[in-house]
Amino acid sequence: MRELWVVHPLVLPQLVDIYAKYGGLILSLTSRSPWSIRRPTAVSRTSHQSRSSRKKSAVSRPEQPNNIERDHIELYCSSYFAYAPFTHLFRFRQSPAFHELEQRYRLMRKLDIANCFSSIYTHSISWAVKGKPFAKENLKPSVCFDRLFDDLMQSANHRETAGIPIGPEFSRVFAEVILQATDLAALRGLERDGLLGKVHVARWVDDYFLFANSEENLDRLEANIAEALLAYNLRLKREKSITLLRPFTSEREQRAASAVSLLRDPLKHLRALLVENEVGRSATSVDTGAASKSWSSVMDNVRNLLGPGTDDDRDSAIAALLRAIRREMRRTRRLVCAKEDGSVLLSAKAGYFLQELIRVVFYVTSLSMKMRDTFIANEIVIDIHTILGRAAPSTKGELMRRIRIETSRAINLALSSNEPRRSEAASLLHILTSLEKDGRMSVAELRSLGLRVDRDASYFELLEILQFFGERAVSEGIAEQVTQEAISRIRRLHKGWILDTSTFLLVVDLSVCPYLTLEQRLRICGEGLRAGGHSNPDKAKTVKALKMMEKGGNWLYRWGGEVDSRLLIRRKELRPAYS
């Protein structure tokens, strides 16, 4: 299981300065290799969403649309740079470019770099930008792009030069600059060996796809790449290499495609029933017999599909299946909500189909328990909940109970495994948070799932529990428990709490939490001041420090009663992966 990082907020101003001053240079340095199929190509466009209409459009950064006042829009962008030619690996595999490679070459070999981000030496960015000999001969301190980016990466990793954070997008940018230099070195090796035009390479971050018409040329191509990487202290993970004959479809990809096909008809029948009923007609055009047959065996078919095979094969199929469900439910929700003429009169069959769909979603999510899959489960449930907003109260209540039962079971499974997945459990709790207005759960019920405020609770877990109880947090005693836990963490670290990312974020996020009392927030702030060297700070000094932290509004965590969870996920602002 990979450990993802959250970067300390005090480091981020450095990143802002680097992007602002050297954004053009970064784009130039990441456009040198013809092999890269995911690279920064431009500064992203900014989307805006009206708080009243929630309609989305795009405007160029940093200009503001003249006819829309800033008070009425929310600007957001999921990443600073736009990426091309492919934003997702599966799009490359489905593209005409891949099909042409399949026609041209008989063999494809898949390779990746062993522990890529953990193995990157931060100083090697200077080798990539200036050339290794020149960089090693000119070590005098200077203010330049490569030195500043190097220093940023060390600051984000406790001043270590070995390894870069896993998770943040700027780590991919840093790695891309270095890997483009290794691509160019390998290309020179191909030219020397007379292989140009006889082979092809596509690189997706640290994953390589090698194409050739003979094993010999594949081996020579791989050797050139390995040699270029070794110069940067990086190595290929050769024990996991796979060579395929065309068509280049692995067993994993076949299983993923089968997962999508398996639910195609059931989801189509469900959408037809919902949309037909939405416009007030009986679903006479829907073959309910065929629909019932398609759903009656869905769970058994899913279980059989995910049966024997490696964990990677299973997880790939689960991801494909969840993406297919998300895509269909997003489409169904849009069709249903586009109508203005009344409620969705869910038939008994449609209700049954939705129950089966909910069971499938949480069954497969529990099998993989990956953060990515819990995010998709969040999105699917949000869309189902939106559709149910137009259903009869009795039907809606029954389906909401099913969602709570399945979510609670998944949370319990995440926390009761040999290696508790606490952040994944907190992500699943977000589902219950978004549905809380339709029902209540007590502290005892929450504890029965395994979620509790204690020393082992992650930063995000603590805040998600607070958000879950909301205005009830004080009366239920949760607010005081979180306050005491935050103070305990400050005391354990003493002055080091400011440099500990999760504790620092916990303190500043709690300082603006609307579910703590002013007295509780002042206690946390006062403890932080004392641990930081202010002996017995008076109330005036504590209040001043608290007001300073409140100036910026929300820090990392998004507090608020009416949270648009779908928008948070789209913006990549639901952040349990980095806790």
Image (cartoon, helix red, strand yellow):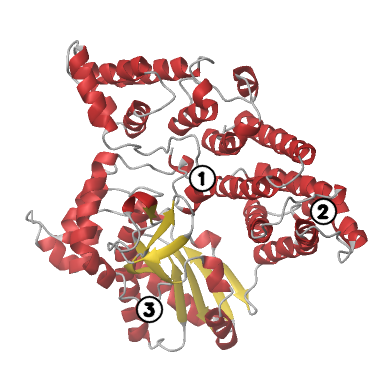
Tell me which label, 3 or 2, sits earlier in the chain: 3
Instruction: Judge by depth and name the residue closer to the eye, 329 or 225.
Output: 329
What amino acid is found at the position of numbered circle 3 in the picture?
Answer: Pro
Residue 424 figure quarter: top right
The residue that mark 2 highlights is 298
What amino acid is found at the position of numbered circle 2 in the picture?
Answer: Val
Tell me which label, 3 or 1, sits earlier in the chain: 3
Residue 282 visible (yes or no): yes
What residue is drawn where x is 17% and y is 68%? 130
Task: Relative to 479, say whether 379 is above or below.
Answer: below
Could you say where residue 226 lies in the image, as x and y percent from the top left? Answer: 39, 68
Task: Relative to 396, say whether 340 is above or below.
Answer: below
The Cα–Cα distance between marks 3 and 1, rounded to whole angstroms, is 40 Å
Q: In this view, does 565 lie to the left or right of 187?
A: right
The residue that mark 1 highlights is 564
Q: In which quarter of the image is the C terminus?
A: top left
Could you say where residue 562 lies in the image, as x and y percent from the top left? Answer: 50, 38
Task: Relative to 430, say whether 20 is above or below.
Answer: below
Instruction: Judge by depth and name the residue closer to the eye, 525 or 302.
Output: 525
What amino acid is found at the position of numbered circle 1 in the picture?
Answer: Asp
Q: Label 1's element? A: loop
The residue that mark 3 highlights is 34
Q: Is residue 471 left or right of residue 36?
A: right
